[in-house]
Amino acid sequence: MKLVFIHGAPATGKLTTARALLRAVPGRLFDNHVAIDVAQTVFDFGAPGFWELVHTVRCSVVEAAAKHDIPMLVTTYCYSASDRLQFEDLAAIMHKCHGEILPVHISCDRKEVLSRLGNSERAQRGKITTEQSLDEFNSIFVPAPAPRPNCLMLDSGVATADEMAATVVSRFGLCTSEKQSGR
């Protein structure tokens, strides 16, 4: 199994890029907010136990996908340097299952991020929608690339989601839907 680990700060285009990637290659999406939504059914955001449950859900989903031979899982994550142990847990699951973790870090400049905060889908999904919330988040969770030499660095301010998806496909040698279906 391949785990495409698309990560970066809020509003950099992680989910948009994941969706574009899955239009190009067959796989399943495990969006960061699914685990957060599960945890919010039990805890207030950030309360004691909240992040532990989020991590347990993430690990369980990756393990289940590997156990049941899902060829590729694309996940999104607001990764920061403080998440290294959680990232290593996911990498260990992939290693145990003879899989591969493919880290993709997405960033863009602040002006671009701020222009995206008002997106109606962000509000509907309970994502960060104000500059103040963004600054609070980034002051606690300092975004950083995953600690891997093969981490692909992309800038969503200069490339479209489809262009970034094509770069991911090329860099990691992923088979496109067309190749697999013989078209």
Image (spheres, helix red, strand yellow):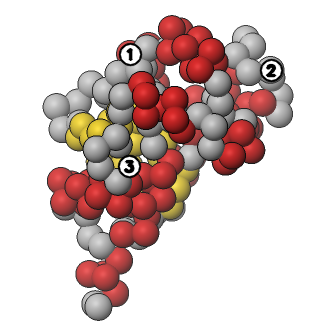
Tag 3: Cα neighbours inside 10 Å, few (<14), some, or many (≥20)? many
Q: Residue at x 62, y 15 (%)?
A: 132
Name the residue tied to disc 3: 3
Helix, strand or loop status at disc 3: strand
**Mark closer to the chain start, 2 or 3:** 3
Helix, strand or loop status at disc 2: loop
Q: Residue at x 62, y 43 (%)?
A: 119
Q: Which residue is more in the foreground, 13 or 140?
A: 13
Q: Which residue is more in the foreground, 102 or 105?
A: 105
Name the residue tied to disc 2: 44
**Mark closer to the chain start, 1 or 3:** 3
Residue 143 image position (x, y, % from top left) = 41, 20
* Residue 96 visible in this rendered orientation of the protein: no
Circle 2 or circle 3, nearest the eye: 2
**Mark closer to the chain start, 2 or 1:** 2
Name the residue tied to disc 1: 81
Residue 62 image position (x, y, % from top left) = 50, 46
* Residue 105 visible in this rendered orientation of the protein: yes
Residue 169 shown left or right of residue 149 in the figure: right
Residue 78 image position (x, y, % from top left) = 49, 29
Q: Which residue is more in the foreground, 65 or 175?
A: 175
Marks 2 and 3, how far apart in space?
29 Å
Please name the amino acid that badge 3 sits on.
Leu
